[in-house]
Image: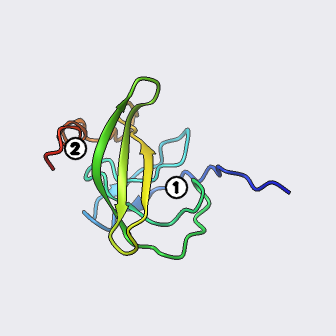
Amino acid sequence: MEQKRFTKNDNGFICTHCGKEVHPLGYTSRNHCPFCLWSLHVDINPGDRACECRGEMEPIRVEPDARKGYIIIHRCTKCGELHRNRAAHEAKDQPDSMRLLIRLTAGKL
């Protein structure tokens, strides 16, 4: 039996890195803070919340993608695992900080 690779889990949360309240996106799983771009290592597959690590995921760089806009590369500060996450810079409510996305693209965060 094949396991689902994506589970919609679009809940709001309080960012463990900067403490700000983050609203749901409304169309997909929000997995990082739009204010500081940090995340938590909670998923094995997107939205499943099945990972037991729970370490903070530091945004280490951003890669422009012609089809998906920007891809944020996060590294877990606890176990070192890398994750690629699509930026939500065009979201209507709480879009990702374009200033931080550009700084990470230039490698200057």
Q: Residue at x 38, y 30 (%)?
A: 90
Position of 38 with respect to 4 (left or right) is: left
Position of 108 with respect to 15 (left or right) is: left
Q: Could you say where residue 42 lies in the image, as x and y percent from the top left?
A: 50, 66
- Name the foreground residue: 80 vs 11: 80
Q: Could you say where residue 50 lies in the image, as x and y percent from the top left?
A: 60, 68
* Disc 2 secondary structure class: helix
Looking at the figure, which quarter contains the N terminus?
Answer: bottom right
Looking at the rendering, which quadrant does residue 43 occupy?
A: bottom right
Q: Amino acid at mark 2?
A: Leu
Q: Name the outermost residue toward the top.
A: 66
Q: Residue at x 58, y 65 (%)?
A: 49
How many numbered callouts?
A: 2
Q: Could you say where residue 18 lies in the image, as x and y percent from the top left?
A: 24, 63
Disc 1 target residue: 11
* Disc 1 secondary structure class: loop
Vertical placement of 107 versus 59: above or below?
above
Vertical placement of 109 versus 42: above or below?
above
Q: Which mark is residue 46?
A: none
Pointer 2 or 1: first along the chain: 1
Disc 2 target residue: 104
